[in-house]
Image (tube, helix red, strand yellow):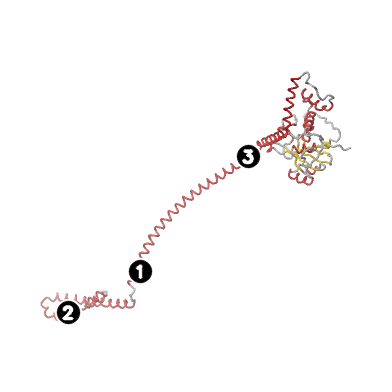
Amino acid sequence: MNIVGPARLILLRAGKYDYGEVELINPLHLVGPNNIGKTSLIAVLQFLYIDDQRFMHFSREMAETRKYYFPDQNSYLLFECLTPVGYCVVGVQGRGPIRSYEFQRFAYQGHYDAADFLNEERCVRDPEEVRGRLAAKDFRLLEPRQLRAALTGIGDNRGVNLGLVPIRQRDHYERFRAVFGNLLRLAHLRQDELKQFLLEINRNDFQQPEIDLGASYSNQYRKVCEQAEGLRELRAIIDDVRRVLELAALRDDVQRLLPGLWVAVRAEYGRVEADLLQRKKTLEETCVRMDEEGARLADTEKQCKEERDTLLQEIGGITGELVRHEQDKEGFRDFLVDFETSRKMTWSSDLIGLAQFLIRQRSFLQSRCEGGWTRKNENWPECGTGSSNFPAMLRLSCCRISPQPMRTRCSG
């Protein structure tokens, strides 16, 4: 006989279980010593039946409970359920320490297949790989309100119809949630909580559902009526209150994410800071090398300027020489080599003749001095003849040796 409800529970890296699989169709008894995980195994049913974790009850605080069941992203709680439309798997996956060990729910159609979550080495697959394998099985993420709708059949259930908590009115789910939570923790209920719990269970069995308090307790009855009126007013704004509670829950979720995000930001900040410090050190070393290179280039520039000044001075001297050479070139423009060579030979011949003449004149003067003044008149005609030719020869030689202006003056 097939009964709608959870048929199998699977735990992957959750709590104290690396892998656990429990059949839920038949009655089940858990036997074992203390502190081996019996209570934690039963308590996981809350993740299937209770939509809001604020209404769950565990032996630890909720933050420690999430860390216990979902230490990383490879932690899963899987519930294979028989629904009115066939088998469906509802899963709960951890989101890791960065997201404060929060969890998310999902659902897909069909039976549980270990190959979708475990590889050949029986290790849990990467979350993205798991999601890819489940995509063909109508994989869908479920928000708390969508899980509630899937359990009750009332509201937006994203196409997931579990039918595990059939109710007629929306607010009956709160009663179920309270009863279910108390069933899991009967050993920890106080007397007033147990009394309220029994009243909730047997509410439909009361033969006298109302008590007329107007006769004996008019004042108290009036107060109760006023409180009832206030309660009706509150029910009139119940949708707004639920919206506020949802926003408050969202705020709490965001606040739980902040510590993990802060740790991630600090780690990234440290990495970026270390990188910037290393780059700063590299740039400072580069600046030192550039300063040294600048000093060396300044010395080289100074030497080059000195060499340039020396070269400019040499160029100035060479330019002066070139100017003088140009002037000499202009002065010797009419210079004829053959003609000047002939003139030089003529001058050389005249100089030789003049030297010979001077030698003869010197010999003559010596002989004259030695012969005495008595022979002066006798020899004078000969000397006169030689002396008369001396001025003419001297002028001719000077005109040949002298430049053109002198030659003109001599000819005049």
Q: Position of residue 13 (x, y in %)?
A: 76, 37
Badge 3 marks a residue whose secondary structure is helix
| Cα–Cα span, label 2 and label 1 | 47 Å
Q: Position of residue 29 (x, y in %)?
A: 84, 31
Q: Residue at x 51, y 47 (%)?
A: 287
Residue annotated with mark 2: 388
The quarter of the rendered structure image containing the N terminus is top right
Front residue of 104/412: it is 104
Instruction: Name the outermost residue toward the right.
Output: 1
Badge 1 marks a residue whose secondary structure is helix
Q: Residue at x 69, y 38 (%)?
A: 99
Q: Position of residue 109 (x, y in %)?
A: 81, 43
Residue annotated with mark 1: 326
**What amino acid type should be assigned to the residue bearing mark 2?**
Ser
Q: Position of residue 271 (x, y in %)?
A: 61, 42
Q: Looking at the rendered structure, which numbered label has been put on residue 265? A: 3
Residue 18 in sight: no
**Viewed as shown, does residue 123 lie left or right of 353?**
right
Front residue of 135/408: it is 135
Specify the quadrant of the image occupied by residue 159.
Answer: top right
- Which is in the foreground here, disc 1 or disc 3? 3
